[in-house]
Image (spheres, grey):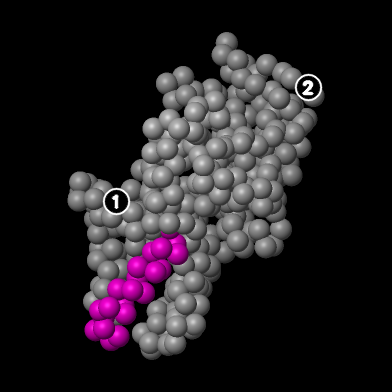
Amino acid sequence: MKTDVITRESADSLFSELRSRVSDAGYLSRMPSREMGILAAIMAAYAASVIGLLLAPSWPIRGLLLVLLAYLSIQAGLIAHEAAHRNITGVIGIDRLLGVASMCLLVGISYTRFWDLHRKHHRYGGDESLMPQVRDPAVDINDKDVRGRVWSARILFPLMGIVQKVQALQYIWKNPDSTRGDQIALVLHYLLWLVVAPSIIGFPAAFLNYIILAILVGPYAGTLYFITHEGMDIVNTESPPPYLMRQLLSTRDLGSGVINNLLLAGVNHHVGHHLFPGMSRFQLPKARPLIRRFCRANSLPYAETSTGAAFRGLARSLYDGYCVPPGLPGSTAYYERS
């Protein structure tokens, strides 16, 4: 297997070349009409599902509606994610409005807080302060800190949806001036779920619906984040490697195809997203073969893991804190500071 030393200068040069190829292929163009159409469909299906819950259906139907709402919430969150990267219209004000409507109104968490955390994540790729804490295999499992992290993950992961809502309110409380749009949208969100709904079906039923929905959404959203970075490099933020290397070393792609795209909502093409966050998510599957070929041709570390292996790795991390880094087929290129 070929091993090359990648200097900062050569990494920057390679990234410029890759960007030129991606741009020449037309993969950096936005697709606003498709995003807007999906958002309209999500809002219509969300409204219909909520109305269905207000009819107080039997538990099987109620459960199906809550699962559908959880999936719609994730899809809405991904539209907000695209809006945060200005990948919908490219106009800051319009994309922010779409992001707030998607994430605050439908999901019930702070769009501004999300973007504040997410841009830090993109800056460094794998950042220890944002990545799931997992045990180093060289560390004794009986270590108190390791056991504490493992049990925290086991307890908090199922409750992520509720934790995110609490943290969103805390963030807004501390940043009232920069979260005006969030505040308005969240008030409407809670009016729908905790005022209008209780007035029709009673508070216990409405509150139970809301809690179940939050419990369904949280682990799903957390899984989509963790499985694309779990086991990858943790970037030293004090002395980070060049942009190309820190994104390739800290991010991986997962399985492709229709089912994977529906289940993973596009995050399975995550290497391309981290390299080019301004690329529409609908262009990522097209750009993926180009990026893979370029990395392999230049002995760059491109990680690709099956979806099943990624889920098994996450389950193992939550169970015992042990994380196995995925292989980097075709290359062991590494970064050496010049």
Residue 247 at x, y percent in the picture: 57, 33
Residue 284 in view of the camera? no
The verdict on residue 200 being magenta is yes
The dominant secondary structure in magenta is helix
Residue 220 at x, y percent in the picture: 49, 58
Q: Quadrant of the C terminus?
A: top right
In this rendering, the answer to whether 255 lies above or below 137 is: below
Instruction: Give the quarter of the image for residue 18.
Output: top right
Residue occupying image coordinates x 43% and y 30%: 143
Dot 1: within a 10 Å radius of its alpha carbon, few (fewer than 14), some, or many (20 or more) residues?
some
- 199 or 215, nearer to the observer: 215
- 252 or 102, nearer to the observer: 252
- 182 or 246, nearer to the observer: 246
- Residue lying farthest top? 338
Q: CA distance from mark 1 to mark 2?
A: 46 Å
The verdict on residue 263 being magenta is no
Taking the image as shown, residue 254 lies to the left or right of residue 240, namely right
Instruction: Give the quarter of the image for residue 313.
Output: top right
Residue 18 in view of the camera? yes
Amino acid at dot 1: Gln
Amino acid at dot 2: Lys
Residue occupying image coordinates x 20% and y 46%: 174
Q: Secondary structure at mark 1?
A: helix
Q: Are marks 1 and 2 in contact (CB under 8 Å)?
A: no
Q: Over which residues does the magenta segment extend?
A: 198-218
Q: Which residue is mark 2?
A: 2
Q: Secondary structure at mark 2?
A: loop
Say whether disc 1 or disc 2 marks the residue closer to the N-terminus. Answer: 2
Dot 2: within a 10 Å radius of its alpha carbon, few (fewer than 14), some, or many (20 or more) residues?
few
Q: Which residue is mark 1?
A: 167
Residue 307 at x, y percent in the picture: 66, 51
In this rendering, the answer to whether 101 lies above or below 82 is: below
